[in-house]
């Protein structure tokens, strides 16, 4: 007996691969309209209307993104988390600010040279370790400090861990003093290079005390970069 044949077409199941989701390393990363600093910054329309002054769309360690395309050192990203930014925060940032797979972002975790730094104070408790660290190199930049912090974490942190980095021991009496005002605030701000907290290890904090208060007290040694 010849089996009956069906005239129904075969059903082909198509599986669409979801785009890979990435984190962001850093803070206050401005989104641009094209792949380069020559392109305009993307305006955050809602914030601009609410505050009455121009605000630009930015991303930081708290968001998740997908990559839509790449051009040279730049990638076009779209924020997918939080979802309410997904229609407005679409544009170009430097690819180096995107946290890709562990293998692509793996830091060379070679041992630190003990002559290059000194732990000047610790303040640990049952929940978190706190390291105050003097970096002894006279010449350093953002990238070298951030790499140092990652290596320091790898060597010294055994649990939730905050790492605070300074370039002078002179501020040691000011570390636990509160409140700081005037010259004391300026002094700490000028020598407090970076902070990496246990709950935001990918946040690249650079001279965290150089803020509006620093300017009000008359601080002149501004280290933070202006948005180009």
Image (spheres, rainbow, N blue to C red):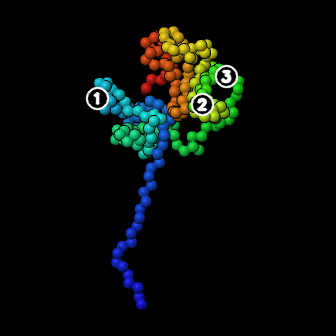
Measured Cα–Cα span from mark 3 to mark 1? 48 Å
3D distance between C-alphas at marks 2 and 3:
23 Å
Residue 124 lies, in percent from the top left, at 61, 26
Residue 126: x and y, percent? 60, 30
Residue 143 is at least partly visible in this image: no
Q: How many badges with numbers are in the image?
A: 3
Residue at disc 1, secondary structure: helix
Q: Which residue is mark 3?
A: 118
The residue labelled by disc 1 is 49
Q: Which quadrant of the figure has residue 152?
A: top right
Front position in the image: 120 or 165: 120
Disc with the residue nearer the chain's start (1 vs 2): 1
219 is higher (above) or lower (below) than 1: above
Residue topped by disc 2 = 126
Crowding at mark 1 (Cα within 10 Å: few <14, some 14-19, many 20+): few
- What residue do we see at 58% from left, 30% from top? 128
Q: Position of residue 91 (x, y in %)?
A: 39, 38
């Amino acid at each position: 007996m010849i089996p009956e044949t069906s005239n129904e077409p075969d059903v082909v199941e198509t599986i669409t691969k979801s785009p890979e989701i990435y984190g962001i390393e850093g803070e206050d990363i401005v989104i641009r309209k094209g792949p380069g600093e020559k392109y305009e910054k993307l305006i955050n329309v809602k914030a601009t209307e609410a505050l009455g002054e121009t605000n630009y769309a930015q991303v930081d360690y708290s968001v998740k993104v997908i990559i839509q395309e790449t051009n040279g050192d730049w990638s076009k990203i779209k924020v997918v988390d939080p979802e309410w930014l997904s229609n407005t925060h679409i544009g170009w940032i430097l690819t180096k600010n995107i946290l890709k797979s562990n293998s692509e972002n793996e830091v060379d975790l070679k041992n630190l040279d003990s002559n290059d730094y000194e732990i000047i104070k610790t303040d640990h408790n049952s929940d978190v370790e706190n390291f105050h660290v003097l970096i002894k190199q006279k010449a350093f930049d953002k990238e070298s400090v951030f790499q140092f912090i990652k290596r320091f974490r790898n060597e010294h942190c055994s649990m939730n861990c905050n790492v605070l980095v300074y370039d002078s021991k002179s501020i040691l009496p000011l570390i636990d003093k509160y409140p700081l005002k005037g010259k004391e605030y300026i002094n700490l701000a000028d020598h407090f290079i970076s902070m990496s907290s246990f709950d935001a290890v990918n946040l690249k904090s650079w001279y965290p005390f150089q803020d509006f208060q620093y300017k009000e007290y008359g601080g002149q040694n501004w280290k933070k970069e202006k948005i180009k």
